[in-house]
Image: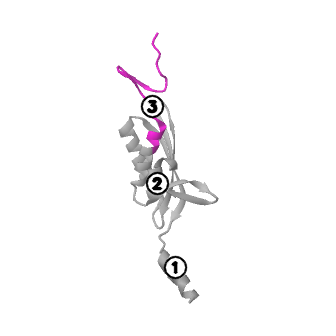
């Protein structure tokens, strides 16, 4: 009697298993490709969203992977002044397209969580001002 792994695709040569971490990285890359995304968010910690760099893409992504389907949650920080509904729709399309084309899984959900807004700041004028007050 042949044993068939229930969670993996079976071929003539064996089984194909895609680790959830692979889906997380694909989703993270597809998310930061979207214009207006400042970065991935590691979550809300003490009310402050943690901006993650490229090395931690999967930290802002949660996935549920089944035999044929996947559901994805991405947590992001957006650039100030950008249209959040447009950015979110583009993320959903890009994540779905990337995962489906690379893995063959059907993506049934892409939920976008906006954790913060990133403002451009100039630190040098603030430093110069503090030095001017000391003189």
Disc 3 and disc 2 in contact, CB within 8 angstroms: no
The residue wearing badge 3 is 68
The residue wearing badge 2 is 88
In this orientation, does residue 78 appear? yes
State the separation of the CA atoms marked 3 and 1. 55 Å
Of the numbered discs 3 and 1, the one sitting upstream in the chain is 3
Disc 1 and disc 2 in contact, CB within 8 angstroms: no
- Front position in the image: 55 or 96: 55
In this orientation, does residue 93 appear? no
Residues packed near mark 3 inside 10 Å, few (<14), some (14 to 19) or many (20 plus): few
Residue 97's disc number: none
Determine whether the residue tagged by mark 3 lies in a helix, strand or loop. loop
Determine whether the residue tagged by mark 2 lies in a helix, strand or loop. helix
Query: What x and y, as percent, mark residue 33?
Result: 39, 54
The residue wearing badge 1 is 127
Q: Is residue 15 magenta?
A: yes
Query: What x and y, as percent, mark residue 42?
Result: 54, 53
What residue appears at the point 40 percent right and 55 percent down from the top-left corner?
A: 34
Left or right side of 78 for 45: right
Determine whether the residue tagged by mark 1 lies in a helix, strand or loop. helix
State the separation of the CA atoms marked 3 and 2. 24 Å
The residue furthest top is 1
What residue appears at the point 38 percent right and 44 percent down from the top-left corner?
A: 98
Disc 3 and disc 1 in contact, CB within 8 angstroms: no
- Comparing marks 1 and 2, which lies closer to the viewer? 1
Where 102 sits versus 111, above or below?
Answer: above
Q: Is residue 19 magenta?
A: yes
What segment is highlighted magenta in the picture? 1-24
What residue appears at the point 48 percent right and 66 percent down from the top-left corner?
A: 80
Pick the quarter of the image with the C terminus: bottom right
């Amino acid at each position: 009697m042949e044993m068939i792994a229930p969670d993996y695709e079976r071929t003539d040569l064996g089984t194909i298993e895609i680790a959830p971490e692979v889906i997380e990285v694909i989703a993270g890359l597809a998310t930061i490709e979207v214009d207006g995304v400042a970065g991935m968010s590691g979550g809300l910690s003490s009310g402050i969203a943690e901006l993650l760099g490229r090395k931690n893409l999967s930290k802002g992504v949660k996935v549920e992977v089944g035999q044929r389907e996947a559901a994805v949650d991405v947590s992001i920080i957006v650039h100030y002044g950008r249209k959040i509904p447009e950015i979110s729709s583009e993320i959903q399309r890009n994540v779905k397209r990337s995962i489906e084309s690379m893995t063959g899984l059907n993506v049934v959900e892409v939920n976008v969580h906006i954790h913060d807004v990133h403002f451009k700041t100039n630190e040098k004028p603030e430093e110069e001002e503090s030095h001017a007050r000391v003189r």
